[in-house]
Amino acid sequence: MSDFVPKTEMERIFVQTLGWDALRLWRRLISNAERENWSHVAAMTLSLTFVYLHQSATPTFSAHRRSRLEEDALGTIEYMDTVLGKLSMEEQHSYFRLSHLALTLLAETDATFHNAPVSCILHFMHEVFVQESRPKSDQLEQALLLQRLYACESWRKQFLNEERPVCIKVTETKKFELPDLEMEKAERTRQARAESPPNVPMPCYEFIPELGIYVEVFEDKFVFETDARLKHHESWRLRIVKIHEDGEAHRSGWRVGDVILSVNSFPITSIDELRTSYSNLLPGEVVAVKIKRNDEIKSYRVSLKKTSSMRQHKRADSNRRHELITAGHSRQFESLNSKLDECTTRYGINSDQATHALVSLASFVGRTRIFGVNIYLYELVGILENHEIFVSAFDLRRVYYLSRDIQAEPGLLDLSRKLQTLVFERRIADFGRDMGMAIPLTRLVRIWSTTNRLKDGSDLCKSLQEWARKSLPPDDLIFRQIESAASFVNQLQMRSITAAEVNLPRQQVSDNETGGGGSMSLVPVKESAGEPVVEPDDEWKETDEFISMMALVALDHKYNQREQQSDQVLQELLAYYAECEGEDARRVGEMLWALMETDLRESKSFREGLIELSMRRAINRHRRIRLYAHVKRLVYLQQAKNKVDATLRFIWEDCRSIAPSFATLVYEQFLHFAVKDRRQYVTPTSSKDELEAAELEFLNIFSQNLPLSQARLQFGNELGEQLSECFISAKRPAEAIDILRTLLAQPRQTRENVTLLLTRLAHAHVADGNVFEATAVLYLAFNIPDADDYFDPESEPEVLESA
């Protein structure tokens, strides 16, 4: 029984909140971690983090107990990193989404679950996970079942007896209401919360030296009752209780009992908001203040006091905050350093645990700069050069981020470049476990080209080919990536490409070689002292790499007529888009809309799912304009196969409830779009003579070295797009590649046209079997610009503003 005694503060809380069965399950999973499914360990470790987040807000904790809990939580989070390093990329994305959604729910439901037990919180999370996440992978489903397991004791017993849990129908619950768990403890908690008095702030008097007044916080019921739009907490106001005779408020005619409503049109409901309203103003500036006196609103203009003490308070607070942060960093550094010593002593200096601990310590030091990072960088270089030491893909990404962070430091550029090269070579060595290796291999090809190391690149590609031929079938996607990469490097060697020939801007394809062997540049190149210097890609993002990899897999399945597998990958992309927020959501949406230029638009579920998600995320005028342009382009492409009516019917019938005015606008604008007709120059059923005549006309447009008008260039784009589709359908992708490269070489192409043409070029490369260049071109196409580069209100109809 001594084995089940809680050993840490977190385990003690874990037992109190979740029960002894959960602790036994946790110990059993940890002891059998090598044999059990790592996804269960990840879910349990994530739950421990939830326990810490919930209990850390408890006001009854002493400072000593809180510090012990913080240390346990730090160790748990570090262990979570180790667990994630053992999961596949698909499982990692599932748990990243799970943890992000859980932390969001904890932040939003803090007031609802103030006194609720952790079991109630976990049960509520499970309800929302099933409704919002719509899990489609087995790993995420296991995590959700395990979350359900913690909340219900019957589920725990079924799992411990190795019985399969039965499926339970999840009832729909409101987001901020505690669901009916049918537990006596939860019912008592709700009753106690209902009977408890509201959280009314205590009377507080504080001196405002800039205005020379003392103020207190009180509830202004008059404002709350007269303005129904206000929330309850917005009815709190500041009332003047004392005025200094030499203050600015006294000179302006303020009186005791006046209520401050706003400062510079900024509503004031607390003392902190009053300080914030003028914290960025200089002494002597004039502010506009609204005051309520005897239910009458008055406006005053007051000059801030010349000798402001607010700046001194801010400097003191900043220094105090810096001291606290520095002290916290020191404690965290000592914890990470002790963990590194423990792993080195217990498992060995070259063990996986010691390597992970070193990467964690180096990342922390590089991020905080509290100590010199050089010694850790040299240790990492030694580890990466020793191929007998295993480094997980998770740790390799962290080393790459670290090298990007320290490249601007004086004297660390060479070391940063060395680390990046070693990371790329390590990832290439693990080609068999990651389908996205074509992207780091492309960067590595650029480095070989600019440093005259193509011989090393050719040797590495040959070794990869030997490994692939022994381990993979010929139709495997990774095998074909390696074969096409080796062919590409051989072409570079034969043509003796120099650094000047690969110095191309992003999103352009070289037109120097007309024989179908154009080259790409993912890494810009600069000249310094006569030697080529490879500059890191400042716009590199892991999101772009993930979307490029998944899009290539979907295109490969689609071209080889594996419809079911292609739809599964596309649904995973839609799920990823649904979970992105902010700028990432906009960029991912633009990437997915670019895929409509390929045959993937024939997937009805992908097409309609993307329309619905985009309409839900069209939250401002700019996104509505972009959605309008995307739908217009989709209708234009669908006319060739007479599928316009189905698309518009879906927008009108299924998406009208999401944005009624916008759906009506799109339906009315595009209902008779065919009247403006898209001229069809050639079709896949055109004869060989018709195709040759259209190709000759296309070549005549661009044969002269004269700048083309925008109308002529648009005509060339339309004709080239139709020709490329016909040549791909006719199993002649090499001619389609030449046509698209000719269009990309035109200097007056817009950024949006370049994105669409590059996506079509990637599709042509997949049809040609060159999946290496297809991945790299997709990565170039998905370099989505900022929102301001797309925003051109004059090019869109004025009626869109009303939508």
Image: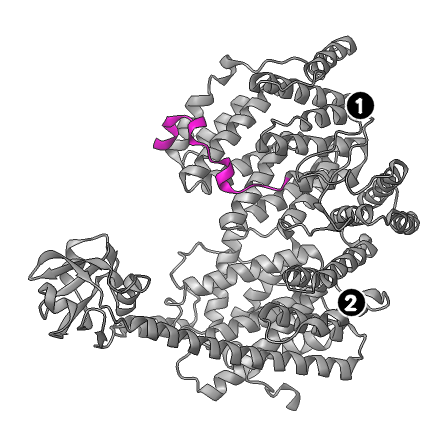
**Residue plotted at (51% across, 26% down):** 632
Asked whether the beta carbons under mark 1 and mark 2 sit within 8 Å of each other, the answer is no
Whether residue 519 is situated above or below residue 715 in the rendered picture: below
Instruction: Report helix, strand or loop for mark 2.
Output: helix
Q: Which residues are magenta?
A: 782-803
Q: Earlier in the sequence, mark 1 or mark 2?
A: 2
> Disc 1 to disc 2, how far (Cα)?
47 Å
**Residue plotted at (50% across, 53% down):** 131
Q: Amino acid at mark 2?
A: Val
Q: Amino acid at mark 1?
A: Arg
**Residue plotted at (61% across, 75% down):** 76
> Is the residue marked by circle 1 packed among few (<14), some (14-19), or many (20+) residues within 10 Å?
some
User: Toward the viewer: 531 or 322?
Assistant: 531
- Picture quadrant of residue 26: bottom right
Residue linked to disc 1: 732
Q: Is residue 596 left or right of residue 423?
A: left
Whether residue 210 is situated above or below residue 769 in the rendered picture: below
**Is 791 in the magenta?**
yes
Percent across and percent down for residue 589 are 55, 41
Percent across and percent down for residue 177 are 38, 61
- Picture quadrant of residue 492: top right
Tell me if I can see residue 716 in this picture.
Answer: yes
User: Toward the viewer: 775 or 148?
Assistant: 775
Tell me if I can see residue 15 in this picture.
Answer: no
Q: Which mark is residue 381?
A: 2
User: Toward the viewer: 491 or 50?
Assistant: 491
> Is the residue marked by circle 2 packed among few (<14), some (14-19), or many (20+) residues within 10 Å?
some
User: Toward the viewer: 643 or 792?
Assistant: 792
